[in-house]
Image: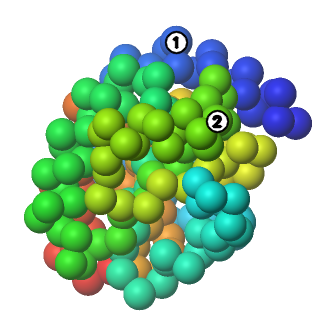
Amino acid sequence: MVIAARAVLALSLALCAGGGQTLEAQATNQVGLPVGTVPDAVTLEDLDGNAVDVSSYIGERPVLIEFWATWCPVCAKLAPELDRAYERFQDRVAFVVIAVGINQSPRSVRRHLEEHPMPYPVLWDGRGRAVRAYMAPTTSYVAILDADGRVAYTGVGEAQKLEAALEAILESGS
């Protein structure tokens, strides 16, 4: 199963060239989990190997989750948009990065973060649990859950408009 998830993720990486989806476009052009669904609960690890229940970030406020890798050039290009969104919404939105377990290790992720720190938690998905639960088609996949834990936005690629998506979700009162 892990091999299949890795194969799907690797193939999808080759196909990933598009931008983020607007909230309106998702109704007809869905990426990953359908809007309105609640992802399955998953337990991952922090980079020190401690168990972390992803649902601990969900339920009080919206949460933005990015599926990421140190080697992903699209993730690097998306980083400034993610940073801007974090600066603007960090007091109203939880941010979590999930490091996929393909061609990297917790050690290589820690080394990368020493040179390129992130202000939000980075969790390790070495077994592909979150990849499957969130139907992550590639790295640079972002899922934003509303305060009730339902998917409100999904997108892939470097051209996602995360600030606009978060603003719309917060204005909707979710």
Name the residue furthest bottom: 60
Residue 167 falls in image quadrant: bottom left
Left or right: where does residue 105 sit relative to residue 170?
Answer: right
Residue kind at label 2, given as amino acid type: Ser
Which image quarter is the N terminus in?
top right
Residue drawn at x 21%, y 60% is: 86
Horizontal and vertical percent for residue 149?
Answer: 50, 75
Residue 19, percent across and down? 29, 29
Residue 103 x, y percent position in the rendering: 64, 24
Q: Secondary structure at mark 2?
A: loop
Residue 20 visible in image: no
9 displayed left or right of 71: right
Mark number for residue 77? none
Left or right relative to 85: residue 44: right
Compared with 162, 21 (above or below) is above
Q: Disc 1 marks which amino acid?
A: Ala
Q: Residue 11 at what x, y percent from top left?
A: 63, 16
Q: Residue under label 1, please give it.
A: 14
Residue at horizontal 50 percent and vertical 70 percent from the top: 150
Closer mark to the observer between disc 2 and disc 1: 2
